[in-house]
Amino acid sequence: MGALKKLFTVLGVVVLMLVVASFFIPKDYSVERTITINAQPSEIYPYIVDLREWKKWGVWFKRDPDMKLNYSGPDRAIGMRSEWQSETEGNGEMEIAQLEHNKRVLYRLYFPDFDMGSTGTLEIEPTASGSRVTWRDEGSVDNNPINRYFALMMDSMIGPDFEMGLENLKVLVENGD
């Protein structure tokens, strides 16, 4: 009985330490990836400003070809929305919030299953060898200790998807539809 009591005491102390430590973890996160595409911004922009075009290069759509998609709002403009339902990729909503023609698309994401949102941008900068495309997603979690640890892992969780999505975008733009 004494060994079991010690075990529970140690486990309780470890859990308490993890909870206390979580309050020292920043609740804000940022994920960013960049790629150079051998094309002008005007050749890249149509693929990111039109949420329907994301099916051609976004990894989530390729992982779940049965994803249910719905689009609303004005095409290729502020207020364009996409909503998706997926058994494997989860459910979500995206809305274009700001645009700079051939330069930048800012969108807002919301995941109703987790009551969590973020803000993302895709920026295109001309370079000597084409264009540099930077994809960034930023958000904040609440004070729930589990969510704080979740924010710590955000880069490793969605960063690879950004890398693959940008690679897909590069191939699509450089090789055409």
Image (cartoon, grey):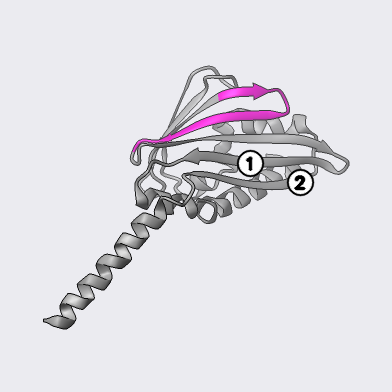
Amino acid carrying label 2: it is Thr
| Element carrying mark 2 | strand
The residue at which mark 2 appears reads as: 36
Which one is nearer the viewer's eye here, 60 or 94?
94
Which one is nearer the viewer's eye here, 60 or 161?
161
**Start-end of magenta stretch:** 97-112
What residue is rendered at 86% in x and 44% in y?
129
Where in the figure is residue 165, as x and y percent of width and height? Answer: 60, 47
Instruction: Report which quarter residue 42 is drawn in.
Output: top right
For the residues marked 2 and 1, what is the alpha-carbon distance in whole angstroms? 12 Å
Q: Residues within 10 Å of mark 2 (few under 14, many from 20)?
A: some
Question: Which numbered tag is attached to residue 135?
Answer: 1
Q: Is 137 on the left-hand or right-hand side of 169?
A: left
Give the vertical position of 25 relative to 1 (above or below). above
CB under 8 Å between discs 2 and 1: no
Find the residue positioned furthest to the right: 128
Number of numbered tags placed on the structure image: 2
Question: Which numbered tag is attached to residue 158?
Answer: none
Where in the figure is residue 147, as x and y percent of width and height? Answer: 39, 48
Majority secondary structure of magenta residues:
strand
Which one is nearer the viewer's eye here, 37 or 107?
107
Where in the figure is residue 49, as x and y percent of width and height? Answer: 62, 28
Give the vertical position of 21 relative to 116 (above or below). below
What residue is rendered at 18% in x and 82% in y?
3
Give the vertical position of 166 relative to 1 (above or below). above
Q: Is residue 174 magenta?
A: no
Counting residues from the N terminus, which is met first, the one under dot 2 or under dot 1? 2
